[in-house]
């Protein structure tokens, strides 16, 4: 059985989708062992408690980044976490934290990276006028929204879209993409060549 730790700061819909897929067996052989928020008011913490999962608030406000990261890492390690999933975790991780979990931290970002990294990616894409956007699940490295890409889902930007409808359709894809990526890294063999990720079903041909 593989163990997942979730880090979040807000409503937690990606976390909830992952939890549902773990419970239904869509993500087999896995268990969410801890949900950690850096904010006490995160909706995701309530959801975790409702689902009977262990939920922990480790406030980040006013703390030196690495000090906070050390508390979070200690909690994850106490729970023997195999994979750390950032699900709307609105805090940059220190290089120290990233080094504790090599190729074991995933993030989801609501654009087709490397386009529109950073905050409000859906609004950035909408304002730029792209015709296609989507979401990306990637490994976390020491740079923001940057590590090797595991799964991307693309959707068209419709003439009838506004920022809200676009973000909602991206979110639907996020909820699918994150579980796919977790399955690829948690229960299967994978390789990373340069920045390129090769999981089962996406093998190098030579
Ligand atoms: C999502 O759009 C995710 O891509 C981004 O933050 C948002 C979190 O939403 N990193 P939720 O808390 O999972 O509902």
Image (spheres, rainbow, N blue to C red):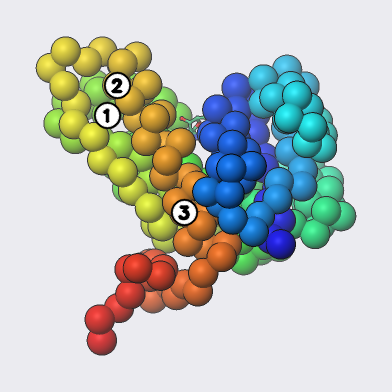
Q: Are marks 1 and 2 in contact (CB under 8 Å)?
A: yes
Q: Residue at x 16, y 21 (%)?
A: 158
Is residue 184 shown left or right of residue 58?
Answer: left
Instruction: Please give the residue where the numbered disc 3 appears in the rendered image.
Output: 181
* In this rendering, position of residue 25 left or right of residue 198: right
For the residue pair 129 and 173, the one nearer the viewer reads as 173
Which of the two marks, 2 or 3, is nearer to us in this view? 3
Q: In the rendered structure, find residue 166 and report the number of the disc placed on it.
A: 2
Q: Does any atom of ligand 1 lie closer than 8 Å to the CB of label 3?
A: no
Q: Residues within 10 Å of mark 2 (few under 14, many from 20)?
A: many
- The disc, 2 or 3, on the residue closer to the chain's N-terminal end is 2
Distance CA(mark 2)–CA(mark 3):
22 Å
Residue at the spot of label 1 = 125
Q: In what element is the residue under mark 3?
A: helix
The correct choice, above or below, for 166 with respect to 187 in the image is: above
Q: Nearer the viewer, residue 28 or 200?
A: 28
Q: What is the secondary structure assignment of the residue under circle 2?
A: helix
- Residue 70 visible? The answer is no
Residue 85 point in image, percent of width and height: 60, 47
Q: Residue drawn 25% across and 86% down?
A: 206
* Residue beneath the point at 59% across and 36% down: 20
- The answer to whether mark 3 and mark 1 are in CB contact below 8 A is no
In the image, residue 55 lies at what x, y percent? 80, 34
- Report how many numbered discs are placed on residues in the image: 3
């Amino acid at each position: 059985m593989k163990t997942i730790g979730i880090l979040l700061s807000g409503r937690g819909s990606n976390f909830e989708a992952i939890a549902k897929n773990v419970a239904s067996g869509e993500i087999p052989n896995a268990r969410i062992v801890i949900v950690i928020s850096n904010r006490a008011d995160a909706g995701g913490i309530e959801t975790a408690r409702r689902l009977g999962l262990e939920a922990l608030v480790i406030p980040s406000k006013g703390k030196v980044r690495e000090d906070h990261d050390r508390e979070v890492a200690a909690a994850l390690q106490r729970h023997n976490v195999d994979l750390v999933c950032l699900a709307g975790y609105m805090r940059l991780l220190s290089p120290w934290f990233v080094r504790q979990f090599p190729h074991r931290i995933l993030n989801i970002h609501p654009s087709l990276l490397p386009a529109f990294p950073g905050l409000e990616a859906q609004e950035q894409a909408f304002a730029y006028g792209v015709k296609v956007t989507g979401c990306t699940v990637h490994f976390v490295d020491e740079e923001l929204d940057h590590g090797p890409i595991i799964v991307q889902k693309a959707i068209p930007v419709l003439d009838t879209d506004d920022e809200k409808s676009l973000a909602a359709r991206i979110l639907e894809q996020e909820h699918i993409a994150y579980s796919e990526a977790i399955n690829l890294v948690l229960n299967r063999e994978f390789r990373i060549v340069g920045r390129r990720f090769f999981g089962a079903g996406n093998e190098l041909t030579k």
